[in-house]
Image (spheres, rainbow, N blue to C red):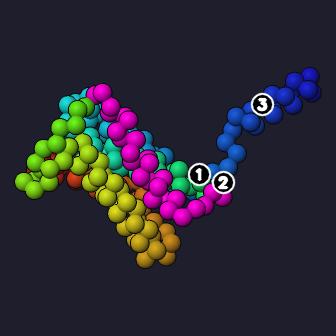
Amino acid sequence: MKSVLRNLFVGMATILPAGAFANPACPICTIAIGAGVGVAESLGVPTAIVGLWAGALLTLLGYWMIKFFDNRGWKFWGRNALLIGLSVAMIGFAYVGDIDYTPEWIWGFIYLDPILFGALVGIIVFILTEKLYEWMKRKNGGHAHFPFERVVLPVVALALCSWLFCLCV
């Protein structure tokens, strides 16, 4: 009976997460961005907006890959830019066969595919909101202003960009 209980305890202990590592963005934000991409596609939202959210999601995954490399001690010159670039390049693999590359004039002076344009804007918006969060946190003595501030900032920024895309693109 003792060995059965011990085995049960050891089995349960291995299922539980061992430790949490700090990530550049929380999993809730990842889920919110991923859900936004899925909902947008199913509702027939323009591809530029889908690209916006997909670019932000892939940038977030690139940040997580950087954290993974840091935990392993794998450091080399240009690593962060390479990992973010490779992560964002996955958008081409995600939509291969589904969306043809059809460049269009955007705002009258940018000739680019809408999903690629949206992804590039999503990358920029996500990185800038992460930098904004870090700056705001530093100015507040190392604490967030309100719970889930790290989640709210990028989601609100991406939602505002989506709204602007609806008006302008």
- Disc 2 designates what residue? 72
Question: Helix, strand or loop at disc 3?
Answer: helix
Residue 114 seen anywhere in this rendered image of the structure: no
User: Which residue type carries mark 3?
Assistant: Gly
- Disc 1 designates what residue? 68
Question: Helix, strand or loop at disc 1?
Answer: helix
**Position in image of residue 9 (x %, y %):** 81, 33
Task: Report whether 76 appears left or right of 95.
Answer: right
Q: Is residue 70 above or below residue 52?
A: below
Q: Nearer the viewer, mark 3 or mark 2?
A: 2
Total numbered circles: 3
Q: Residues within 10 Å of mark 2 (few under 14, many from 20)?
A: few
State the residue at coordinates (22%, 53%): 161
Find the distance from the CA under tag 3 to the CA under tag 2.
26 Å
Q: Determine whether label 3 and label 2 are within 8 Å by CB.
A: no
Q: Determine whether label 1 and label 2 are within 8 Å by CB.
A: yes
State the residue at coordinates (44%, 53%): 84
Task: Classify the position of the N terminus by image quarter.
Answer: top right
Q: Is residue 71 above or below residue 77?
A: above
Which circle marks residue 11 in the picture? 3
Q: Determine whether label 3 and label 1 are within 8 Å by CB.
A: no
Q: Earlier in the sequence, mark 3 or mark 2?
A: 3
Q: Earlier in the sequence, mark 3 or mark 1?
A: 3
Q: What's drawn in magenta, residue-wise?
A: 73-98
